């Protein structure tokens, strides 16, 4: 019964898409090439100069009207690495997003590889730097098996998601459940979210709660996020807290992250950056990042200058 429920839940968007004949689809195909220079100085390597890829990607999106007020939607995004240019190598190195779903007056349902609800509500709100904004935050990565609902009621936007893992030890219906809500309080947008992770062998699971507030005051943008995890939500670490501060002014930005309770006391880094708009399809960004790697990893100082060029294919 448990397996049947899991299959039924994941099959819901597919069933809705198949319920009516397809209309003319609207599709777009784009690419974003991102290559840059970086200078890394740490406790073991001084002045390591690199020319590297910074998240180049291919993006495809589609929308198809199923019937009046109901659309089928899909999105694919694959990272590619120009360094993978040997014979027989495609250069595509990972799947960033791969989801399909439906949207209408009820909201939006998506299933597949995507960000889950905690990122949408809390972590993503302070993920403002071009590179590594939230490495030490919780739920900062895209997950491969997510069923997510997003809706709104008046000024409140709410979302819920479940994550599944076919290889988990407990074979739970939902390995993680996340709930979040966003609303405005004057000039400030506030997000509140929680996540519950099921037991998985040696990982006892646990609960995560988070809150974020963001606002703009006379051209100065400020953000403050707080996250707290109990038990083994963070893997082998217990009772971890995380605070993030962000600031923006024009094209300048800064992100300050501090996590307490991670192994070897890792989890502190600061980023300052500037975005230089060159034209309609290109820009450059410049970042300086300082990372406290804790007792084992040491400290890192990184300077990077990256060129980003976007072009549409279809």
Image (tube, rainbow, N blue to C red):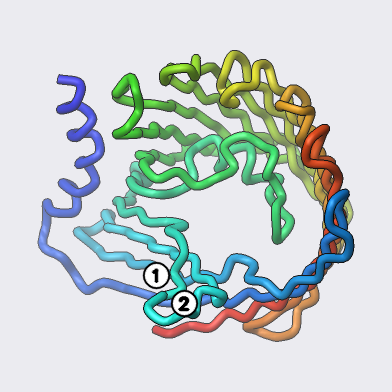
Q: Residue furthest front?
A: 44
- The C terminus lies in quadrant: bottom left
Q: Quadrant of residue 32?
A: bottom right
Q: Position of residue 140 (x, y in %)?
A: 59, 42
Residue drawn where x is 74% and y is 35% of the image: 225
Q: Is residue 216 visible?
A: yes
Residue 97 drawn above or below residue 203: below
Residue drawn where x is 81% and y is 71% of the image: 49
Q: Quadrant of residue 46?
A: bottom right
Element carrying mark 1: strand
Residue 136 drawn above or below residue 221: above
Q: CA distance from mark 2 to mark 1?
A: 6 Å
Crowding near the residue tagged with mark 1, few <14, some 14–19, many ≥20 C-alpha atoms within 10 Å: some
| Pointer 2 or 1: first along the chain | 2
- The N terminus lies in quadrant: top left
Foreground of the two, 259 or 109: 259
Which residue lies under the disc numbered 2? Answer: 30
Which residue lies under the disc numbered 1? Answer: 60
Residue drawn where x is 20% and y is 49% of the image: 14
Instruction: Please indicate whether residue 42 sits to the left or right of residue 102 in the image.
Output: right
Element carrying mark 2: strand
Crowding near the residue tagged with mark 2, few <14, some 14–19, many ≥20 C-alpha atoms within 10 Å: some
Residue drawn where x is 43% and y is 26% of the image: 177
Foreground of the two, 22 or 238: 238
Q: Is residue 257 visible?
A: no
Instruction: Please indicate whether residue 183 sits to the left or right of residue 289 in the image.
Output: left
Label 1 near label 2: C-beta < 8 Å?
Answer: yes
Q: Position of residue 235 (x, y in %)?
A: 57, 25
Q: Position of residue 100 (x, y in %)?
A: 31, 54
């Amino acid at each position: 019964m448990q397996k049947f429920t899991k299959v039924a839940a994941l099959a819901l968007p597919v069933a809705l898409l198949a319920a009516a004949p397809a209309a003319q689809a609207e599709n777009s195909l784009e690419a974003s090439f991102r290559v840059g220079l970086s200078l890394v100085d740490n406790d073991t390597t001084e002045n390591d100069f690199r020319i590297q890829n910074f998240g180049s990607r291919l993006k495809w999106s589609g929308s198809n009207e199923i019937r009046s007020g109901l659309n089928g939607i899909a999105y694919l995004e694959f990272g590619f690495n120009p360094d993978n240019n040997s014979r027989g190598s495609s250069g595509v190195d990972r799947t960033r997003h791969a989801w399909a779903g439906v949207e209408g007056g009820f909201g939006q349902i998506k299933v597949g590889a995507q960000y889950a609800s905690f990122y949408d509500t809390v972590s993503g709100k302070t993920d403002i730097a071009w590179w590594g904004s939230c490495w030490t935050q919780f739920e900062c990565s895209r997950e491969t098996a997510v069923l997510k609902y997003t809706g709104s009621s008046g000024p409140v936007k709410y979302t819920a998601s479940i994550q599944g893992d076919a290889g988990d030890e407990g074979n739970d219906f939902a390995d993680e459940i996340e709930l979040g809500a966003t609303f405005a309080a004057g000039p400030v947008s506030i997000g509140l979210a929680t996540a519950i992770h099921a037991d998985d062998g040696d990982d006892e699971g646990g609960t995560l709660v988070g809150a974020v507030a963001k606002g703009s005051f006379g051209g100065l943008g400020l953000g403050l996020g707080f996250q707290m995890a109990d038990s083994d939500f963070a893997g082998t670490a217990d009772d971890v807290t995380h605070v993030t501060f962000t600031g923006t002014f024009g094209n300048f930005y800064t992100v300050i992250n501090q996590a307490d309770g991670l192994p070897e006391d890792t989890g502190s880094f600061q980023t300052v950056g500037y975005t230089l708009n060159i034209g309609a399809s290109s820009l450059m960004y410049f970042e300086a990042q300082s990372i406290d790697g804790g007792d084992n990893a040491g400290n890192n100082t990184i300077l990077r200058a990256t060129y980003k060029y976007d072009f549409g294919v279809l």
